[in-house]
Structures are given as structure tokens and as C-alpha cells.
Image: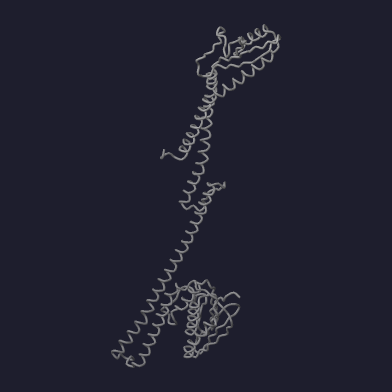
């Protein structure tokens, strides 16, 4: 029974329950009906006795006897004039067929008092001698088999319909969940009711939709992780080359200074060159450390007044700009950005450093806001060609003589992390970096 499928199991269980109920009901009818039939027969005998007694009331004795004798011959109910002094007795010589020893209550006697036309009163007995319990059982056996067969047929039909209705929904759930296991995005259960089965179907649909959304979200996260891993790989591969180049140059200069080779005998001059190389390495290492902390810049957004972050940075970079005779000016008011303070500081620091590095000798750096965009603009040599579309895209060149572009790489990743729009514009002798400000 445990290994049966749901349909035959439900059918057998339902059919067994209905069969037991049918058998019990028919047994109850079989045993209760005789008693009911007997009571009905008693009422019938009593009614006949009342009717006949009413018809012979006030007649002569001879008419009464003839009428009772005629009725006794044409009916199962026997009628007699009770003899005087024969209380509760019947005339045996009439052979009424009564089994006085029967325990099945087959003998029913009714007595009625009538008055003759002479004014004499007599008693009339009405006797039913049929075995009523046997008759009731025979009558029951005539229709109970047909009723039993019809009931079993109906129970088979009801069991089939019930089992089919239950297993149909279960089979539908099984078929659709098989499609869901194959990650068919079109798989869905049809909810056509509000009962428990309908609620179950609805919950399965919601669960599958949540699963698909989670998988899609996870796939997007995986793609993002792969992209970030590739960026990190490209970054550290480029950074390793950048570290090798100045280190190799530093080693060559120091070895030549050690052995007093050619122009390297002027140690004071080349010690300055060595310090410049060390400064460059220091900046590169600092920027690499900044990149390693980009993942921590999240969930710290707030409305930041740009000028509060910019002023301390300008105080630091004006000294470097002054060494190259570059003028620095800013025209900011109460412009704000929705970003983390630390992130904004890194963005502005790298943009200003980049502007100082790439600005031409005795050039200009201007910082301001226009049409809800923050811009950092610097002049460049007119003969220098700069493609604004390639400055942020395509990574960075760590072996470039003009710089490694690592600062702009950091800026791009920070702004992308905070989903802040940015772009670069430029023309002959001027280049401008623009960052979207907070909506006013």
C-alpha cells in the first residue's frame, strides 16, 4: 500500500470507506426494518378493526357473523365474535394458523366492542396470524441486493472522481516542478482556486520567481566579481612594471655612482635624481594603497559641501604648482555632492594632482561649477594632442613618461562605485574633467 501511486491509493481508500458505510447502512436497514414493518402492520390491523366495527355497529348477530366470516375468508386478517367468558381467547377450532409459541411477534390481536340492534353488546376479535418479521425480511431481501449493487457502483464513480480531482492537481504540480528543476523561466502553475491547493500553487510560483530573481542577481554579482578581478589583475600587472622601471633606473644610477663611471661622478646631481625616483615610487605605492581601500568606500554617502573638502587640498598642491609656476584658482559656492567624504577627498586629490602633473609650464588650473557639474580644468601645451574619450577608458599606462594614469583609474572606480556620472571634454590647449553634482 505504501508503494502505490497516489491515484490507485486514493481510489482504494475512498472506495473502502464508502463500502464500509454502505454495508453498515444496509445491515442497519435489514435489522431495523422488520420492527418498523411490524409496527406498521399493527397500525393497519387497528385501522381495519375500527372500520369493520363501525360498519357492523347496530346490526343483528347473524349479519355480524356472516360479515366477519366473509371478511376472514378474503383477507389475511381473521375476525371472530368473542364468546362470553373467553377473555383474551380465540376459537381453536377455526384454525387461524397462529403459532402461539413463536417469539417473532407474528400474532396481532385487536378487539372492538359493538352493540347489536337488540341492544346487546358483544366483543369482536381481529387476528393477524402472518409472520410479520419474516415477511419484513423477505421484503428487505427483495430490494436490498439491488440497492447494495447500485450503492457500490456509485461508490466506484465517486471514488474515481474524488481520486482524479486530487491527483490531477498533484500531477500538475509534479509536471510543472519538473520544468522548474530544468530552470524553465516560463514554468508556472495555474492557480484556479482559493483553497489550500490553490494557495500551495501560488506559494510555489512565488518561491520559483524568488529563486529565479536570486539566481539572476547572483549571476550579475558573479559577472561583477569577475570584472573586478580582471581589473585588479590588470592593475597589479601594470603596477609591477611601473615598480620595476624606476627601481632598475635607480640601481643603474647607484652602481655608476659607486664606480665613478662617466657623468655619474657628479654624485650630488644624481643623488637628486635618485631622490626624485624614490619620490615617484612613494607616490605609486601610496596610490596602490588607495586602490586597495576602494572596497571599503561604500554605504557612507552624505550631502558633502565640496568647498570644505577642496580648500585643504588646494593648500597642499599650491606649493607643487608654484614650483612649475602654475596658477591655481577656484570659484565654488555652496555646491554639494552625495558621496562619502573620504571618497570625495581621494577624487579631488587625484584630479588636482593629475592637473598639476599635466599642466604646461606657467599654465593654469581652474576649479569651478557650471550647469550642476563640478569641473577641474588645466591648460596643456597646444601641440599636445589629448583624446578626452580615451582618458578614463581603457585602463592606464604605467610606463608612460608623462605619468601612469593610476590616479584617474582610482577616480573612475570611486565614481562608478557611487554611481556618479562623469565625463571629460577638451580642445586645443585645454582639458576639463567634469563630475555631476547633487541635484538641487
Coordinates of residue 108 in the picture (x, y in percent): 57, 17
Closer to the camera in the image, 348 or 21 = 21
Picture quadrant where residue 59 is located:
top right
Q: Is residue 74 above or below residue 300?
A: above
Task: State the quadrant of the C terminus.
Answer: bottom right
Coordinates of residue 283 in the picture (x, y in percent): 41, 82
Colouring used for the render: one colour
Closer to the camera in the image, 66 or 153 = 66
Task: State the quadrant of the N terminus.
Answer: top left
Closer to the camera in the image, 258 or 387 = 258
Coordinates of residue 46 in the picture (x, y in percent): 62, 19
Coordinates of residue 251 in the picture (x, y in percent): 32, 84
Picture quadrant where residue 292 is located:
bottom left
Q: Is residue 78 above or below residue 177?
A: above
Point 59% across, 83% down: residue: 333
Q: Is residue 23 above or below residue 345?
A: above
Q: Is residue 214 left or right of residue 42?
A: left
Q: Is residue 175 left or right of residue 44?
A: left
Furthest-front residue in this view: 85
Amino acid at each position: 500500500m505504501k508503494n502505490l501511486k497516489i491515484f490507485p491509493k486514493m481510489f482504494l481508500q475512498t472506495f473502502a470507506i464508502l463500502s464500509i458505510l454502505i454495508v453498515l447502512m444496509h445491515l442497519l436497514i435489514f435489522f431495523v426494518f422488520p420492527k418498523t414493518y411490524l409496527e406498521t402492520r399493527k397500525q393497519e390491523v387497528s385501522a381495519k378493526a375500527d372500520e369493520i366495527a363501525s360498519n357492523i355497529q347496530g346490526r343483528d348477530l347473524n349479519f355480524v357473523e356472516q360479515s366477519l366470516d366473509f371478511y376472514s375468508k378474503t383477507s389475511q386478517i381473521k375476525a371472530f365474535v368473542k364468546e362470553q367468558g373467553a377473555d383474551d381467547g380465540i376459537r381453536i377450532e377455526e384454525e387461524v394458523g397462529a403459532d402461539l409459541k413463536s417469539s417473532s411477534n407474528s400474532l396481532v390481536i385487536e378487539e372492538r366492542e359493538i352493540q347489536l340492534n337488540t341492544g346487546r353488546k358483544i366483543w369482536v376479535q381481529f387476528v393477524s396470524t402472518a409472520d410479520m418479521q419474516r415477511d419484513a425480511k423477505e421484503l428487505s431481501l427483495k430490494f436490498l441486493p439491488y440497492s447494495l449493487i447500485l450503492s457500490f457502483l456509485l461508490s466506484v464513480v465517486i471514488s474515481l472522481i474524488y481520486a482524479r480531482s486530487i491527483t490531477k492537481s498533484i500531477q500538475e504540480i509534479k509536471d510543472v516542478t519538473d520544468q522548474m528543476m530544468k530552470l524553465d523561466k516560463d514554468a508556472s502553475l495555474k492557480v484556479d482556486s482559493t483553497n489550500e491547493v490553490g494557495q500551495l500553487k501560488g506559494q510555489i510560483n512565488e518561491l520559483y520567481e524568488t529563486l529565479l530573481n536570486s539566481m539572476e542577481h547572483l549571476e550579475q554579482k558573479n559577472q561583477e566579481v569577475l570584472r573586478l578581478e580582471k581589473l585588479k589583475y590588470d592593475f597589479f600587472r601594470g603596477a609591477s612594471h611601473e615598480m620595476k622601471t624606476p627601481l632598475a633606473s635607480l640601481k643603474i644610477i647607484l652602481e655608476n655612482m659607486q664606480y665613478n663611471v662617466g657623468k655619474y661622478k657628479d654624485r650630488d646631481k644624481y643623488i637628486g635624481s635618485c631622490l626624485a625616483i624614490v619620490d615617484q615610487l612613494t607616490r605609486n605605492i601610496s596610490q596602490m594603497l588607495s586602490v586597495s581601500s576602494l572596497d571599503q568606500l561604500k554605504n557612507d554617502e552624505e550631502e558633502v559641501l565640496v568647498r570644505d573638502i577642496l580648500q585643504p587640498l588646494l593648500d597642499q598642491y599650491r606649493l607643487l604648482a608654484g614650483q612649475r609656476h602654475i596658477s591655481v584658482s577656484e570659484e565654488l559656492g555652496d555646491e554639494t555632492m552625495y558621496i562619502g567624504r573620504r571618497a570625495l577627498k581621494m577624487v579631488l586629490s587625484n584630479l588636482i594632482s593629475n592637473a598639476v602633473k599635466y599642466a604646461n609650464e606657467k599654465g593654469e588650473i581652474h576649479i569651478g561649477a557650471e550647469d550642476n557639474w563640478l569641473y577641474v580644468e588645466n591648460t596643456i601645451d597646444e601641440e599636445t594632442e589629448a583624446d578626452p574619450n580615451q582618458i578614463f577608458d581603457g585602463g592606464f599606462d604605467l610606463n608612460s613618461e608623462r605619468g601612469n594614469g593610476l590616479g584617474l583609474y582610482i577616480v573612475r572606480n570611486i565614481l562608478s562605485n557611487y554611481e556618479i556620472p562623469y565625463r571629460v571634454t577638451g580642445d586645443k590647449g585645454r582639458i576639463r574633467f567634469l563630475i555631476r553634482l547633487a541635484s538641487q
